[in-house]
Amino acid sequence: MARPVGTGAAVTRRLIRKEARGDLPLLACLAVLVLMVTALCAWAPVLAGRQEDRALRQRVDAAQAQAPLISLSTTPSVFDTSPPALDMAALLGAGRTLTEQLSGPAARQLTFAGGGSYDYNPASLISPQPPRPPQPPQPPQPPGTAIVGTQLTVSHLPSARAHLQYVSGRAPADHTPPGTAPQIGLSQATAQALGVRAGSRLTLEFAKTPGAQNAPPQAELLVSGVYRVTAAADDFWTGRETLDQPSRYPAERSAGTVLAVRGLVGLDAADRLAGAGVGGPRVTWQLRADLSGAALDRARALTGPLSHYSADLSAALCQGSDWVTGDTSCRVGGQATQSLLVTDSLTPLLAAFTAQDRQARALATYAVDALAAVALATVAVAVRLLLRRRQAQLRLQRARGASTARLVLLRCAVVWPVVLIAALLGWAAGRIGAPTGTSGSPQPVPAVLAAAVVMLTVPLMTWLAVREPRRPGRLRRSRRNTAVGRRVVLELTVLLAAAAGVVALRSQGPDGILGAVPVLVALAVVLILLRIYPLVLRLVLRQTRRGRGAVGFIGAARAAHDAPATGLALFVLVLTLGTAVFGGLVHRTIDDGLATGAAWTAGADASATVAGTVAPTGAAVSAGTGASAGAGASAGAASAGTAAAAPRDGTATTGIRTAVQHLRTLDLVGQADGAVISRVAVITVDPRQLAAIAPKSPLAGALLSGPATGTGTPADAGAPLPSFLSPDLRATERTGNFTATVVTQGQPPLNLDFKPVGTLTAAELRDPLLGPVTAQIAAGTPMLITTAAAAEHLMPQQPSGSTVLLLEADGPATAEPAALRSAAAKALGPLARIRVRSETLSTLRTDGLTQGLGTIYTVGSVLAALSGLLALALELTLTSHERRRTTSFLRTLGLGGKEAGAVHFLQLLPLAVASAVGGTLLGLLEPRLMAGTLDLRQFTGGPTRPALRTDYSLTLALVAGVTALILAAAAAETVLARRRRLGAELRRM
């Protein structure tokens, strides 16, 4: 009887449906794994892109709070018309159209801030001359100390208005009546130095314009008001100190000093000065980058047009040359100007961020690759169990004549649709759950590769299970030797690959191999464990054989017998534990490093830095009079000064200890050989104040261990000042003292003698007390710290250098940032740049890269643990048949239920111990292998890279969790074995 057409296909379809229904639990496991991996490929890159955007915005906002990242500047040509004229309001307004020359959408990402500003070159003050207050009789002053001139810089800075408060008069008017003098505002210190007040008139002489003028033009300005500066939390006054305090510098062509001051004028002051024949000022437009949304993509799209922005402006606006200067002539809003200069600080910032982001991505690669390896191992275990459940059917089909290809295709027909559907669902779920508007994008290629690997694993393992066995050879020993040789070759290959990867990683730095090397190291650790594992079990077996009971011997024997078959489960557990331990190490290292970095930035609870070596006001900073250096540390808390944070009602709130550090840059001369060491950072400190701030400070302890430094009374300038040297300065002059000459304008030169009494160690140079003052010193600059109390009396105050005030609170009330800022501003004035440790630590912890790295390790460790748990459950299910068989034999021989549970426990205990030891060893070993490339300093700050710190509490918790998991599995198998009857177990055998 002929078979109807299509009957074979229908039978095959029925067989596929039947096998699919029987394999639903394992197919569901495969589907969950594929869904998880493909969803991560769609969701994780977008989330990482959002964290990168946040980190870049934080850096850009912090940089733009201090200074504009992008600026345009030019000088208007006022002599193109007769008489000279300038419309500054029109010119500043026309600057807003300059972004039209940016190509693409980059113009929409830049906005103008502040409306533009301008600055004239310093002009000589003709009248009035600075007054000379009456002085008591003094010894004759050396030549060159008198003030021989005054230079006044005229500026229009609209952004400064929010940081000023006029104490007399009013702010300069932007629109003055025709025929009246332009108005100028001066600070209290500047008005006092010039001897003027609101309503006074200043006569200035500006530099002449060659080719257009024969004599310097003069102009008269009206002092409209006198202001005082107010404190700013955004570092506004950094680089603008001359708006508040005058400075001095030596005259070029005569003996004496020049007084340099600066004043603020209104908008139309440039128009009035141009009418008086004064050349045009330097006009600056500040551009602010808007990086909302996809910040990284926007920044990259902006840096391209910025690279040729200056050339585009010249091509569009410039033509010909200026007849006065010979420079390129341009026109901005109808006003003739010189060439336009573009200052781009965004591109270097983006380059630095890209390097940091590359390091973060390299570290994240380890967690991602480890998760992929665990997921792949779980897939392999699931497929093995799937084939084991169908082993009898496969043998029967093979005996009935089914070919290997047919069996492989039949397995693929069951599994592949499930994998494809799970991959599509996972991709869709990841796209739906991913945030929008970020620089990250879903990665379809890794998702396709992951699905393809799972799909190819099924036919490969099916072919290995159902292929025709080779014909038995004549010598069984040779076949066994071949298998042993193959294993040795495989193990040596893995070990050599892991060693080569570690060597390449340490020599080349972190790159794409950072993720693959830890997986290879994990595989090498597992192979070593698989070699040691049976040997240890054999030793245990010898000991248990001599014991009285048979339970220990049987459990150890079964564990030794099953040891080779637990390789995949051991690999999953070791890699999962290693990833979690490594992630905990990164978390702990970054967390401790953040605290260290914040302490290094602030120095104490807070620090204030101001330009110039000045004496703090509003804080009585005295060193005390302890008789001995040994008692200095204990008496430091009582002798050090206390800064009083005075509220508005006049009452004083004490409880903030302070320490002052003065930084000067001097040229030293070695007395031994006369060698000159240029630009040495000389820091004057009082070690008793430092000890009061940080009693356990290694720097304070070293400075206090030096010789007595005097009582702070004026001393002879020739007396040696005890000093501590940095190692590089000590290396230049092994013996002898150093001399230096301090020249202060208006005072006679001062010769100082520094006597080295010690060399600073690396720990002392990294002391947080030196953090704020070290930030003012260029890298590689030699350092000298003098502890003589008389040094401050000898070295006068100077406008150069820096003054750092460290503040330490005594209690919670004064530890508040507002109280610390108030005390710092009162001590050093409103121009001080204040850093509070708690605020700095909060900023570091909320950094996008740091949080993104922590999120990746947390999510990766959790998912790897879940995958490892699934793999372990599948592996135990796969090997449970042998354990049940052993238990059935033993129960026929009279083994009780408790003894059977003990056998189950002893069979699985070696696996728990081996995985705990291997995972812990892997997690602790890998960071040490990568110590040369695992630099987390960019995430933490601080003077050096943070030391690797293992989170031992997490490690113990993970080991305990794995052990508890194995024990739970043994208990579950014992309970299930008790519920089965002995006859049923014997029939299953």
Image (spheres, rainbow, N blue to C red):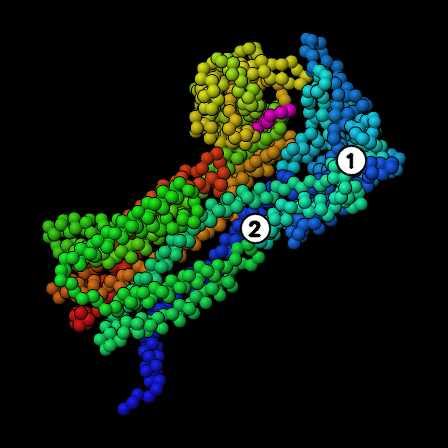
Is 754 part of what is drawn in magenta? no
Residue 446: mark: none
* Residue 91 drawn above or below residue 575: above
Mark 1 against mark 2, which lies toward the viewer?
1
Could you say whether the residue bearing mark 2 is in a helix, strand or loop? helix
Residue extending farthest front: 320
Quadrant housing the N terminus: bottom left
Q: Residue at x 70, y 20 (%)?
A: 252
On the rendered structure, is 545 left or right of 625? left
Q: Quadrant of residue 790?
A: top right
Q: Are marks 1 and 2 in contact (CB under 8 Å)?
A: no
Q: Which residue is mark 2?
A: 296
Q: Is residue 845 visible?
A: no
Q: Which residue is mark 1?
A: 280
Residue extending farthest bottom: 1
What range is drawn magenta here? 799-808
Q: Residue at x 27, y 53 (%)?
A: 490
The percent coordinates of residue 404 (x first, y second) are 28, 71
* Chain-order first, disc 1 or disc 2: 1
Q: Residue at x 56, y 32 (%)?
A: 607
Q: Residue at x 65, y 37 (%)?
A: 236
Categorize mark 1 by other alpha carbons within 10 Å: few (<14), some (14-19), many (20+): many
On the rendered structure, is 894 left or right of 306? left
User: What amino acid type is highlighted by mark number 2?
Assistant: Leu
The percent coordinates of residue 865 (x first, y second) are 36, 56
Foreground residue among 768 and 384: 384
User: What amino acid type is highlighted by mark number 1?
Assistant: Gly
Foreground residue among 316 and 162: 316
